[in-house]
């Protein structure tokens, strides 16, 4: 029984295993970092857009309450800052990579 298992494992080990690259166009760490940054930037931009909508709803439902208006303004400022960071994320990483090289 043990010999069969060992011979079966040996046949699997001796077979050439080729794993295709799941990230097309990524051949080094710099390209991988830029791809990750682009994805994170797009996600942050999308979440920022959703937060602008939420801030608008907070403004509409505040009914004149100064506390709720302050909350809505804070949400709007953070959403705009998030979109700005999301849009400039790739440029920030490229600048850092340029300085490092």
Image (spheres, helix red, strand yellow):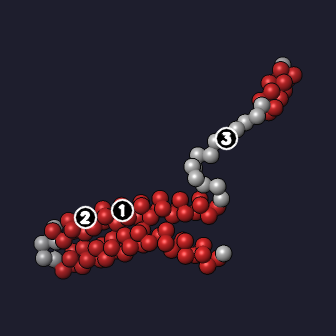
Q: Secondary structure at mark 3?
A: loop
Who's the residue at 64% across and 61% down the image? 29
Mark 2 crowd level (few <14, some 14–19, many ≥20, 10 Å Cα): some
Q: Residue furthest left?
A: 63
Q: Quadrant of the C terminus?
A: bottom right
Where is residue 34? Give x, y as percent.
Answer: 55, 63
Q: Secondary structure at mark 2?
A: helix
Q: Please tell me whether residue 55 is drawn above or below residue 21 in the rendered image.
A: below
Residue 19 circle label: 3
Residue 85 lies left or right of residue 34; in this view the side is left
Separation of residues labelled 1 and 2 (CA atoms):
10 Å
The quadrant where residue 60 appears? bottom left
Who's the residue at 59% across and 61% down the image? 31
Residue 84 circle label: none
Q: Nearer the viewer, residue 68 or 88?
A: 88
Q: Secondary structure at mark 1?
A: helix
The residue where tag 2 is placed is 53
The residue where tag 1 is placed is 47
Q: Is residue 4 visible?
A: yes
């Amino acid at each position: 029984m043990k010999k069969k298992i060992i011979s079966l494992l040996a046949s699997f080990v001796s077979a050439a295993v080729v794993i295709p690259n799941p990230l097309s166009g990524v051949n080094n760490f710099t390209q991988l970092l830029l791809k990750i940054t682009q994805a994170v930037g797009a996600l942050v931009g999308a979440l920022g857009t959703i937060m602008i909508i939420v801030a608008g709803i907070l403004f509409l439902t505040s009914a004149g309450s100064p506390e709720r208006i302050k909350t809505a303004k804070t949400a709007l400022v953070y959403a705009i800052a998030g979109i700005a960071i999301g849009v400039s994320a790739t440029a920030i990483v490229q600048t850092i990579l340029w300085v490092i090289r």
